[in-house]
Image (spheres, coloured by chain):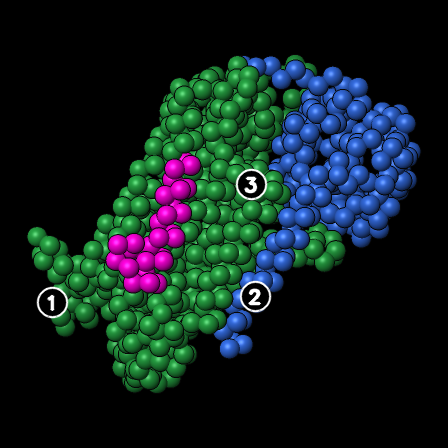
Amino acid sequence: MIPELGQVALILALLVATLQFVLSLWGAQRGRESLMAVARPAAYTQLALVLLSFVMLTVAFAGQDFSVAYVANNSNSLLPMHYRITAVWGAHEGSLLLWALVLSLWTAAVARFSRSLPPEVIARVLAILGLVAIGFLSFMLFTSNPFDRLLPAAVEGHDLNPLLQDPGFIIHPPMIYMGYVGFSVAFAFAIASMLDSRSAGHNSERDWTRWVRWSRPWTNVAWAFQTLGIVLGSWWAYYELGWGGWWFWDPVENGSFMPWLVGTALLHSQAVTEKRGSFRSWTLLLAIAAFSLSLLGTFIVRSGVLTSVHSFAADPARGVFILVFLCIIIGGSLLLYAFRAPDAVAGKPFAPLSRETLLMTNNLLFSAAAAMVLIGTLAPLLFEALNLGRISVGPPFFDLQFAILMAPVVLLLPFGPFTRWQKELPGRYLPLLRFAVTAILLALLLGWLLGDGFTLKSYIGVAASAWIIAGTLRYAWQRLRSSSALNAETAGMLLAHFGMGLFVAGVLLVESLGVEKDVALKPGSSAEINGYRFQFDGVERVQGPNYRADRGSLVVFDGEQEIARLHPEKRAYASGGQIMTEAAIDPALHRDLYVALGERLDARGDGATVEASSWSLRIYVKPFVRLIWLGGLMMMLGGFVAAADRRFRKPATAVRTEAA
Amino acid sequence: MLRRLLPLIVFVALGLLMLIGIRISADRDPDALPTPLLNQPAPGFALPELHQPDRIVRSEELAGAPYLLNVWGSWCPSCRIEHPVITELANSGRLRVIGYNYKDEREDALRWLGQFGDPYDLIVVDEDGRTAIDWGIYGAPESFLVDAQGVIRFKLVGPLSDDIIERDILPRIGVASAETATP
């Protein structure tokens, strides 16, 4: 009964989304107030229905209803309760439901917080979001229904993929989806502005700044969630996959990274369009691209076109459906763009040295980076399609290309805030350069004195980081001195740039100083790596709730002092499947000690018991790896802080007092 | 106008590529595209062994008992994914697993094995990929099941999984698949 209720709610949600799309768009184009008024209630109703459906699926998981095929495939009577709930989005059907839920959340939020918008604008925006919802809801109902029954019911479930039985996985997908779907708002605003028939490419100056100002806080929030999602994903891959890396350029990772890169360009481009009126068509195109790449990211994960650690189900029928959907949404909006985009020359003129130029460079570099990732991700497919055999584009390609594109970003970043709109004089950079160069020299000196085994790359890392951080601090100081308070937008920008400085240091230091060693150890013996002594105390068998594990014990000494006890595990889950490696990590800001349990070496020999066997172990020392995620979290925080700027809420307050 | 159409044109090209991708991934099903060598004697080869480059392994030496020929390379990310599956199969002793190191550098291959473990009985090296043409190998990972008489019984393009081993591979050589006991 409960699954049927969820199913019916889903069908009703699809009908409501259709009404939301058709009626509000028709009303907006014909100027009929009564039809436009449908948009808001429809958005709230859709949220209620999708939420009901999501709750019903959760209830089916919590109650172990193995007569639902999706539950039977992704749960198991031994699965602990918290993983039963997260198993709701552990595979294809349920994660689509989560996507739809997040979309209806964003839609309802737009409906709620846009009281100040003219009715035809909000009707158009909600109509576009309704169209996206139609796509996802019908995809679910026609090709991947989470409520399909399994008759006769299974006695026992198949279990949630062990890789996903992890706390990091509880929050990673919802955050990524908040970002993916959040870009739909900027997208809907962009489309709505082009649908405005009064304009046909000739919107007045005021209209332009208005729609960009409306969509800016939404873009910031979406970008911040996306940042958080990527940071969590990277952290999850770091400790869960047991390979010691923090980024693998895997197709699915790339799928979430491309919208982020374009989203970063979009944030900066929106600032120019709002404040100066320039880059209008470019901002439109980036808004379309960011959301298109989000859809493409979903497509890559769902269609099985590219193989990856993350791919759930490969089903060509689903692939074709998503492709048709992509063609309607992306193809449609690009066609609209071709006919309705504004003229390229607009806004106030600017000199070659001006903030506009620097932001344009930022836009080009980030877009080029996204294009590079796209090409690298799809190259294997292209080669296969042209019958050139299979190739694998790996980290060497991405690392090099990405470094080339990001080097100018790092170099130019501190100049950005110091540069004035329209025209700047080179001489005004002197205070910045004096301060930053001193900081760089100090950082290099510190690295030389304290740095252990520093290579050229590590020196570049500390110098680049000092350059960004010093430039950011110098600007903050200048602003605080001249005007008493920083507004939220500037504070957010400074936070995010500071985070970028930490991130750069983290990446280059861990790449240049990280140590990786494979050792074979007998119980009682030890290995010395980077000044740390890892003493191996053997392996024991332990029983978990739904798995059996070999659990190793190591004690780490720094000199004579014990600094950590580590317990790496290899788990065999009761439901079968591959053996999972659970790495043990001792984290600290300046270094991580990371141990993964390898193979039992004399397993095929006789005599030795598990306890007395020697094992191969993979040991990593990762200096400053935490800075990568710390920097990412600061960028996220910057996005949220900037979105909270009072300027974005101003018109809304005016109307609210009126209504009250 | 043309400049404004450019994004659309790029997208259409991308869409076509995706469509081809979907068709290829549909064909990837091993039953839909059987190798012409299926149920034919395996092509002969004489290739050096990875750990002892002086030793030449001939296909005849492998006859007498069934084996799984697993094509891999250190450059191939999917090989990493299937590696635990192969390790488990080899350690269970139910089937010999022969590695086929394809278009790889020796040092890279050895480092890769050091990192992820070496479950293979022995590993033949095909550095320039010439023997691979006889076998119809066009990438990694691929796996061939060769029976005791030297006949190819099954071919898989793409990473192995426990399911495929239990369902498609072990039954073909008469090894009873381990009962998937419900816990």
Q: Position of residue A621 (x, y in %)?
A: 46, 43
Q: Is mark 1 on a helix, strand or loop?
A: loop
Q: Is mark 3 on a helix, strand or loop?
A: loop
**Which residue shows up at 42% across the image and 51% down it?**
A131
Amino acid type for the residue under numbered disc 2: Val
Reply yes or no: does residue A82 show up in magenta: no
Q: Which of marks 1 and 3 is nearer the N terminus?
A: 3
Q: In which quarter of the image is residue A476?
A: bottom left
Q: Is mark 2 on a helix, strand or loop?
A: helix
Amino acid type for the residue under numbered disc 1: Ser
Q: Is residue A516 left or right of residue B100?
A: left
Q: What residue is pinned by disc 3? A: A311
**Which residue shows up at 27% across the image and 46% down it?**
A41
Chain coloured blue here: B
State if disc 3 and disc 1 touch (CB < 8 Å). Answer: no
Name the chain under label 1.
A
Name the one closer to the observer, A321 or A242.
A321
Q: What residue is pinned by disc 1? A: A484
Q: Where is residue B152 in the image (x, y as percent from the top left)?
A: 85, 33
Can residue B74 be spotted in the picture?
no
Neighbours of disc 3 within 10 Å: few (<14), some (14-19), many (20+): some
Q: Are marks 3 and 2 in one subunit? A: no
Q: What residue is pinned by disc 2? A: B10
Neighbours of disc 1 within 10 Å: few (<14), some (14-19), many (20+): few
The mark closer to the camera, 3 or 2, is: 2
Q: Colour of chain A?
A: green
**Which stretch appears magenta?**
A10-36
Q: Is the magenta stretch mostly helix, strand or loop?
A: helix
